[in-house]
Image: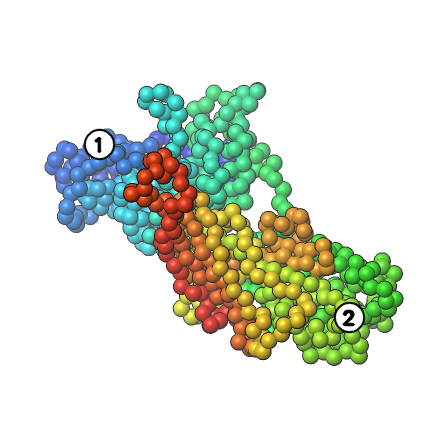
Amino acid sequence: MFVGLNLPDSNGSSDQSVVEAALQQGYDMITARITSRKYRKRIQSIFHELEQSSNNSAFFTTGDTSNRNSPVQSPELNQEETVGGTFETQVPSPGLEDVVVHPGAHISNTIALASPWVEIDSKNPRVANLSLQVLEHELNYASFCGLPYVLISGPKRRTNVAQYAQAVNTLLHKSPYVQVVVHLPFNEEHTVSASSGASVPPSDYLSVWDVWNTIRQLCGYHPNLSVALQVPKQSPKSYVLSRWFTEPVSMLIISSSTFVPNPKGFPVLPKAIQNLFFQFFKKNPFVILEDPYDSQFTGGDNAFLLYLRHLHQIKPKQTACEEFAAGYADLLQAPLQPLMDNLESSTYEVFERDPVKYNQYEKAIFHALLERPNKKLAIAVVGAGRGPLVDRALKAAATADREVLVYAVEKNDSAYVYLHRRQQEKWGDKVEIVKGDMRSWKPRTYINIIVSELLGSIGDNELSPECLDGAQAILDPKNGVMIPSAYSTHITPMMSPKLYSAACSIGRSSPSLPNTGIGMGAPVSSAMGSKTNANLHTPYVVMLQQVDRISDTIQLSWRFKHPSFNVLPNNQHNARSFKETFHVAHKCVIHGIAGYFETVLYKDIQLSTNPDTVNEKSKDMVSWFPMWFPLSEPMYLLDDSEIDISFWRLTDGRKVWYEWAVETYAIVKHVDPTSNASSSSRRNSTSAVRRIRTGASEIHNSGGKCYAMIL
């Protein structure tokens, strides 16, 4: 965790001595202004020359128009008259006497603060024009100095957010090497009633997020645009916290007044604010401390810094899955296709590091053996890889006191060689190695138990149904069993600006990672982005972190059972379709669909990646990451909305692919004006509800043109 100090110096200057003093106190960085008060006076003079009327000069003479900690103001404030026309006045760039920061080693420990007095969203075009030029000069100078971050105040009025966003977009394109960070409050603060003196909560806790969403959307999800959140003093709503967690929050700014004294007088944070920090620590944002010198807490100025360090040390431990996937959170990977491709040894090795999965498989094989009276049984491990299920089958047989012959069937030439080595070193004549495709293998006798681990991130996406359809011909027709015996796909809508941006950028800045098979995925090829929007019509395997589950429900999409008794030509019996409605309580944006699976290995022995059932069925299992089906265009939803998701698994006998589409609806309560019922009963009626369609996506991956699994 990096903690910075917002310097109290009115000039906000930064040099090596200032930075070294902060570092000696234990801070990692400081904030500093880019330009001085003298530069502001120069701009003020220009404005006076242009604007003879004193009515409009108040902007530059009265100081800041708003508190920098609350940059989003209500529509009633700052109601200037709109002035028409355009302005060609060129604002001079700052000179030596106008800047308070210079290049040097200290720059890497400095966050730049843009002038808070500018108003790029002013209704006065002259003020807006001059303000934009000032920011252009400041960002240009910051880029020259090597300052990586420039913090700018958020919009000062709600009625001109589009103009603010247009100005920010201009800055982003003119200064491509600077990260522009917009300072916003977490949500609107409580107000005090003038009549009763009581605390009045905001009417809309997501109004500030709504402003940010508009800015981000109008700026095209620019990768150099992020947000700095002012940590609230009141406990945040859980859904507000969830929304902000998905966003590119690069900084948390906290005032010393947010802290409360513990019994000994030292500063601590309320439990709700502690939980906010614990959540955002996963994103590793900068933490900027304000006003540490203005407090009366025990422990002095450094007490706040020491507490923040302590808070980071006591953050909750990572789950087993988070530890396993370190460095892979929100990284898009192409789903593996083991039927079409031969996997590498390192990929198999990753699978084998999951004891939970293999313990459950061993348990399933053990119980299947116990319930079969035959003293000598045949087990086929189809798709044996490097043999982990062979090991578990032999161990289960020994525990169940059953004599078995295990067939290890594998089509991968290299894995076939490795299996022979395992046979020589450990298995001996208890195992027979078979090279070939499980769908065409013809053993000498029927198989009592067929075991496979072809499950993908949503169960069927590695063609397990098609592979096991072919293998079931060798199953003992009287008493044979297949492990797994069934599996199902489960989906839910999600919000994730990060994953949407990542999919859009494939082919331009894809990270280079080894083909590890982490979470049943492989690195995404830039070739996927060669077609128009192909990268947004392609499913991905991804360890979901910066996502918001915008609906409370995860719905079952479809199931497969083995053995299958209704095999149709061209694989049509394995086609599936699904349509379901998801309720959304609070305004949000849907960026895609998350997919999970549940599987029954044998009777009550199960595995799951579904967040609602994973702890019950296979806690700490790490083999599979969820699947992500992106939308080509994000879709905005209002409070109390509904999403209809249509999802298809299609096949033509040569390949299998998925298609998906989304429709959004506003829920409107309709009151019949001709009704004789009382007004109160009409308001409380639940029958007069209408769904009004507000949007529909295209059908993604139509015909499997962008992604398909080859049979």
Q: Is residue 543 visible?
A: yes
**Disc 1 from disc 2: Cα separation:** 92 Å
Q: Quadrant of residue 695?
A: bottom left
Q: How is the image coloured?
A: rainbow
**In the image, residue 488 above or below residue 92:** below
Mark 1 highlights which residue?
61
Q: Secondary structure at mark 2?
A: loop
Q: Say few, some or many: other residues with alpha carbon within 10 Å of mark 2 (under 14 / 14 to 19 / 20 or more).
A: few
Marking on residue 478: 2
**602 or 298: which is nearer to us?**
602
Instruction: Compare residues 118 and 624 and report the one nearer the observer.
Output: 624
Q: Is residue 63 above or below residue 388?
A: above
Query: Does dot 1 land on a helix, a strand or a loop?
Result: helix
Decide: is 281 above or below 567: above
Label count reads 2
Q: Which mark is residue 180?
A: none
Q: Residue at x 74, y 66 (%)?
A: 481
Of 469 and 56, which appears nearest the observer?
Answer: 469
Select label 1 or label 2 by which is in front.
2
Q: Residues within 10 Å of mark 1 (few under 14, many from 20)?
A: few
| Residue 595 spot, x, y in % from top left | 55, 57
Task: Look at the numbered discs 1 and 2 and tell me whether their residues touch, using CB distance below 8 Å.
Answer: no
Q: Is residue 334 left or right of residue 666?
A: right
Give the residue at x 63% y 69%. 465
Q: Please report the residue visible at 49 percent of the width from the left and 27 percent of the height from the top.
A: 259
